Amino acid sequence: MRPYIRYIALMTAGSSALLVVLLGWIEPSTATLSVWQPSLLFGTGLLLRVDPILQPLGIILALVNCCAILVTLDRVEKSRPRFLAMIQLLLPAGLMALWSANVLTMLVAWALYDLLQALSYIVAIGSARWAIKSLVFGYLATLLLWIGTLISDRAPDSGLWTLMNPTIAQTTLWTLAGMIRLWMFPFHLAAPGEMTFDSPLAAPLFLGPVLGWGLWIRLMTISGVILPEWVQTLAALNIAVGGWLAWTCKSTRNILSWVGLTVNGAILLASCLVDQNGGMIAVAGAVSWMLGITVLLLGQSHRGKSPWWSVPSFISGLTLIGLPFTLGFVTTSVLADRLIGGELEIGAVKLWSAFFGSLFFTPALARWIWTSAGAPAAVSEAPVGPAEEVSSKDTEEDTEPDEDAPDSVLFSWLAAVFQRMPVPIIGRALGMGIPAALIVLGGIYPSLLVRDADPLWVLFQRPGGIGWILWGISLL
């Protein structure tokens, strides 16, 4: 059974991704998960609604799971069924958070996701340190969301996001919860730092901030909500802090956490600077960040095999920097227009924080892509959790299917099919190629991935001459 676990998981992940894509074509409707209606949360139940503006995040989240399993087909180490199972369970919890129609559903989804993420850390590396840290920060964000909900004096129906009219106090608490969920400074210690587990399956663990983006995008799309002014300043400071931490990081293996900090800070700043369509900017930036980080994580074990396998990582680096013809350019065009393209009155702190962070961010990201110093250790040296340790004798026995098993005929047929195909190469190419292709297609046709996104020619027209010059200097 063990030799086929990856293929079974791949079929499950692929079916889930296809289902999430198909749900985007269905007319939005509200589904009731439970009739439980706690009086402390307006007496509403657990409700799900596939919001069109958040659907791209759900699709990419499901796609990342599928691509991570595809890339593992090229790995020679034994299958890790428990870790595969935990990664598969993270997906529905993440989708539940994105599709939550009210605050109660989001609270339950956040708590469930935090628990599953902590268990995934334990199964992956056999250490409780990361698990405890993720639980502490995760439940702190959940507590702030809950307190912000309790202080509302609105009518019971206001528990629905579409009917929300939050007060200033609620908005402040919820923005703090969103900051923690995005792993932003001064809560950046919530991000995974020392990544000692080099399996591609670890990619979904780096996408925890997608829960934060689900909250931020809802706040930006609620009519009448005004985000606190300090959000822009803190987002700009995150660009500077993230760029500096990435540049000064001693091991290239640990850079990606600070790369995500910088990129998410830039996305949040750009979405707050626009008067309208802030939610669209946040969705485009979040999708670009998810695809870029995923490709870098999936490609870390293939950088030394052939120059061709470095192309997807190079494309992901371009979108994280925000170069034209990538999806990340949606965020860059806004920053170049509003921040350094003639509107310097927004504040010197924001301007120079973003400029300072960009100066260090680009070379730090290039170091990750082009150097081999951070290449993962040999597969035989990859850490294995205590729950996954098996003897060589047991492994050899697991690699041979039992001929007397009821499903041995099906397994034998599958083995015969896969043996005739270059499955590892195909899996690696699809797992890294699909996200990279979406980055380019989304850069050329942004509306292909993000609803109501501005076309490419509008993005090019936004920055003024000074904006383009200063942005180019920051890249060099």
Image (spheres, grey):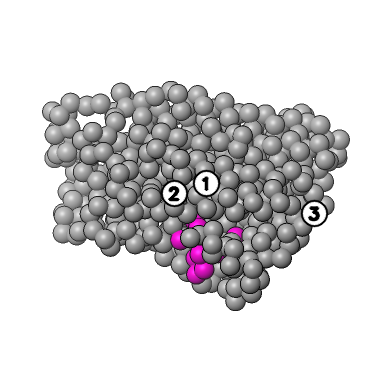
Dot 2 and dot 1 residues touching (CB under 8 Å): yes
Based on the picture, tell me whether residue 319 belongs to the magenta stretch: yes
The residue identified by callout 3 is 223
245 inside magenta stretch: no
Name above or below for residue 303 compared with residue 146.
below
Task: Write down the residue under mark 2.
Answer: 364
Q: Nearer the viewer, residue 211 or 355?
A: 355
Quadrant of the image containing the N terminus: top left
Q: Which of 373/460 is in front?
A: 373
**Residue at image x 64%, y 51%?**
352
Amino acid bearing label 2:
Ala
Q: Are marks 3 and 2 in contact (CB under 8 Å)?
A: no
Query: Do the residues under discs 3 and 1 have CB atoms within 8 angstroms?
Result: no
- Place of residue 90 in the rendered image (x, y in percent of width and height, measured from the top left): 48, 39
Select label 3 or label 2 by which is in front: 2
Which mark lies nearer to you, 3 or 1? Answer: 1
Mark 3 and mark 2 lie on one chain; the one further toward the N terminus is 3
Left or right: residue 66 versus residue 189 is left
Q: Which residues are magenta?
A: 318-331
Q: Answer with mark 3 or mark 1, whichever residue precedes in sequence.
A: 3
Q: Secondary structure at mark 3?
A: loop
Q: Which residue is mark 1?
A: 243
Residue 138, percent from left and from top: 58, 31
Residue 168 in picture, x, y percent from top left: 82, 40
C-alpha span from label 3 to label 1: 34 Å
Q: Secondary structure at mark 1?
A: helix
Q: Quadrant of residue 404?
A: top left
Q: Residue at x 53, y 72 (%)?
A: 445
Residue drawn at (40%, 54%) of the image: 366
